[in-house]
Image (cartoon, rainbow, N blue to C red):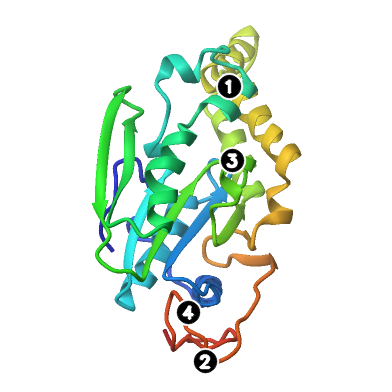
Amino acid sequence: MRCVPAGLDGNPDPIVTPERAGVLDLVLHALAAVNRPRVLVGIDGAPGTGKSTFADEVAMRLARVDLDVIRSTTDSFHRPRVERYRRGPASPHGYYLDSHDLDAIIGRLLRPFASGARRVQIAAFDEAKDIPSPAFASVASERSVLVFDGLFLLRPELAGHWDLTVHLVAEQRRDEGWRSYLYDDLPARGPERQDEIDARLDRARWPRYRDGWRLYVEQVDPADVATIVVDNDDFAAPRVLAESITWPPTGEPHAVDARASTQPSAEPEM
């Protein structure tokens, strides 16, 4: 795999199990059903569901069959802080509507890549430094795959650009992480305990992120429209909750590999 922009934070040493390999193999088989040379894959999910790691794993598997793979993420296309927080730092609508530069994602990456451009922009902004930080990637082959992860990928502005989408859920793990953040190492009792909880809630801007994600779910219902829905609570044993893959007739050329089988198997022939 090559062409990885800043902003990606996946686990460099992900868990390897037969169960996880089976889910990733299903994604590769679904990609084989896309009959076009340039394929755009969106890995969607709430914060903490494991999007970047899952996308990296898909990209690594694709690279092993000598495909030209480009990686990018919404985290490389943030808006400047003043724009993200213009509705207020705790605004759910600001989180959903103002976090990312959708025009840049579409106009500089998704559309050019899909149309066969040989050079695309894979990053535009450094969120931590709050400054522009453009990065570009050369696309060497006509048969290439863009693996893009991030928040809100099935929103109306982006939904029509993907050939395949994977929506990750991990509610139990996210809830456990949230409870740990709120309640670990608190003062034993008294007003200090509640004051510390209130301070942690304020630092986390919890209405912004909780209710902002809820706005997206209520508008889009991503688990209903994604190609594949994966319960990623247990990294060692993820589960496919739903899939809507249209398998092509045997012998048609596929973007991922014309030799790929038309039904899932334990070891896909890519």
Query: The C terminus is located in which quarter?
Result: bottom left
Q: Label 1 neighbourhood size at 10 Å, few (<14), some (14-19), many (20+)? A: some
State which mark lies toward you, 4 or 1. Answer: 4
**What amino acid does circle 1 point to?**
Gly
Where does the image place residue 138, in percent across and percent down from the top left? 24, 56
Residue 145, placed above or below residue 11: below
Which residue is pictured at 49% across the width and 59% down the height? Answer: 41
Q: Earlier in the sequence, mark 4 or mark 1?
A: 1
Q: Label 3 neighbourhood size at 10 Å, few (<14), some (14-19), many (20+)? A: few
Where does the image place residue 179, in percent across and percent down from the top left? 62, 34
- On residue 157, the disc is 3
Q: Do the numbered discs 2 and 3 sit on residues whose CB atoms are within 8 Å?
A: no
Q: Nearer the viewer, residue 241 or 110?
A: 110
Where does the image place residue 186, in percent across and percent down from the top left? 55, 22
State which mark lies toward you, 2 or 1. Answer: 2
- On residue 254, the disc is 4
In what element is the residue under mark 1? helix
**What amino acid does circle 2 point to?**
Gly
Instruction: Kindly identify which residue carries mark 1.
Output: 94
Residue 57, placed above or below residue 121: below
**What amino acid does circle 4 point to?**
His
